Amino acid sequence: MKRSNPLTGVLGVLAFAAAALTGGAATADAVTPAVAASGTAAAAVDPLPRITVSDDPASRHLVDSETGARFIPRGNNYVRLAQVADWHHHATFEPGEYDPARVEAALTYMGNSGYNVVRIFLDPGHPQHNVDGQPHGLGHGNDDHTVGNAAYLDNLADFLVRAAARGIYVLPAMDYYPFNAYYADIAATSAPQQPNLAGWNAFYLQRSRINAKAAYLQNVVLELRERVGAPLMTTLLALETDNEAIFEADQKPFSLTTGRVTGPDGRTYDLAVPAERQALGDNGMVEYANSLVAAVHEVDPDLMVTTGMFTYLAVNKTIDGFGVRCDRTVAGNSCKDAWHYWYPPRPAALSARSDLSFLELHLYPEPGKTLDQNLASVEWPSVTGPVVVGEYGTRRSYHGGDVRAAAVAMRDLQVATCRAGFGGWFYWTWDTDEEAVQREFVTATEQSGAVNGQLAPVVRYDPCLTEPSRRPVRWTPGWPVPGLPFPGGYGVSR
């Protein structure tokens, strides 16, 4: 959701896993952070195999492109926040905020726990903070004509190298595009401006803004390649175009019930017809996704692209042509808070008609909203291809403040989604504690790593099983090739 925003060594984690597997008194306390090590030069790091989609169109899994072995992403969201005015922004890579020692410790802890991926967030900046003279992120102010803040990109490259050295792939979430003069010019002049497109809707439906986003994705690839070298670009699992793509039904065009609007696909839609309004959202998001995939593949033909989203139930919606709407331009309107009018993209449309490599769904079951109900709200039986859980987590209040009960619930959620056909998981979050809302969520590392003790692949190698399991000695097709350094791909017995 949009929110207001060491192991003591391999022996330590293996002892933890062994105790769990033999029925001993394994506790999460055994999984503790390693001492941070110094950074590693890119030239000294062996590239990871590129991860890609299966050649089998019916497959719901990713694969190692070198071996053909199934690859199951298992990891966490690594998030650092900082406050500007009344807003917390993603500050993991902010110059002056980036903490290489903390990053090294976290990646070492993750790697020793068996995780093979980490999800991060790139900060595009904030328009109002630019005006206020407090720019941050990749778009460092309205007078910034660069493709992205160089020092910020240096920090991102450093993170990528450190992750590769630990055998961990990186998935960057890339909302919007940097708020600076370079991208503003593309957004304003690269294509005719269609009327009646406003708010977040314009980022997905206005062709010129899609062009700006395409340039952003390309530039990040090119800038990272220049810094880390082409071989280490395989460390990127994919580029994620949006943390959570959102349409707003209190902003044009979905706030309107009359008139016509032209989508980025060139088709004109009648806003008086609910089916046409739904088609505008569905087709527009497919066009947006396909345009961005094409742009990425111009500079890296093998790099995967994905998009994140929450469920319809998460925001109390159904697939209804944006029926819950409000026109804020009408005097005396009775519009509620903005989130009342949020709608996600339609996963079934994206999986069927877009060029995205896989989809990324966020799941936060809460009282009265079960996993089955969440999946039903997104037409789960009609969603095809690989889908990963890009965020799953829980508020401590749902478990009476009992962190270990929350940990068991998260294990059970992973098992249930695995059995439902999901092919990867990123827990929300690893250790984020800089902001009040985030402190409501149980992190993976608190209370001596209670959640990590349930989710770590060295404890539960098979994510479809609640009980501890370990990597098989013998391999069969679909399992990782013997001899790959741990952690590599993960296989799941069936």
Image (spheres, rainbow, N blue to C red):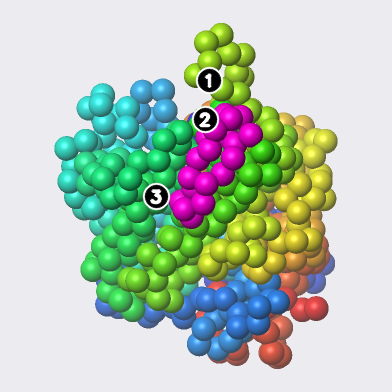
Quarter of the picture holding the C terminus: bottom right
- Percent position (x, y) of residue 299? 33, 71
Q: CA distance from mark 3 to mark 2?
A: 17 Å
Name the residue that disc number 3 marks: 207
Which residue lies at the image location 68% right of the left edge and 58% below the top edge?
348
- Which type of secondary structure does the marked residue at label 3 adopt? helix
Give the residue displayed 47% in from the left and 53% down from the top.
266
- Magenta segment includes 271: yes
* Residue visible at 80% across and 50% down in the picture: 376
The disc labelled 2 sits on which kind of residue?
A: Gln
The segment highlighted magenta reads 253-272
Q: Which mark is residue 251?
A: 2
Give the Cα separation between the discs numbered 1 and 3.
24 Å
Q: Residue furthest top?
A: 332
Q: Are marks 2 and 1 in contact (CB under 8 Å)?
A: yes
- Please tell me which residue lies in front, 185 or 475: 185
Query: Is 487 in the magenta?
Result: no
Q: Is any part of residue 120 visible from this angle?
A: no
Left or right: where 150 falls relative to 414: left
Residue pointed to by mark 1: 328
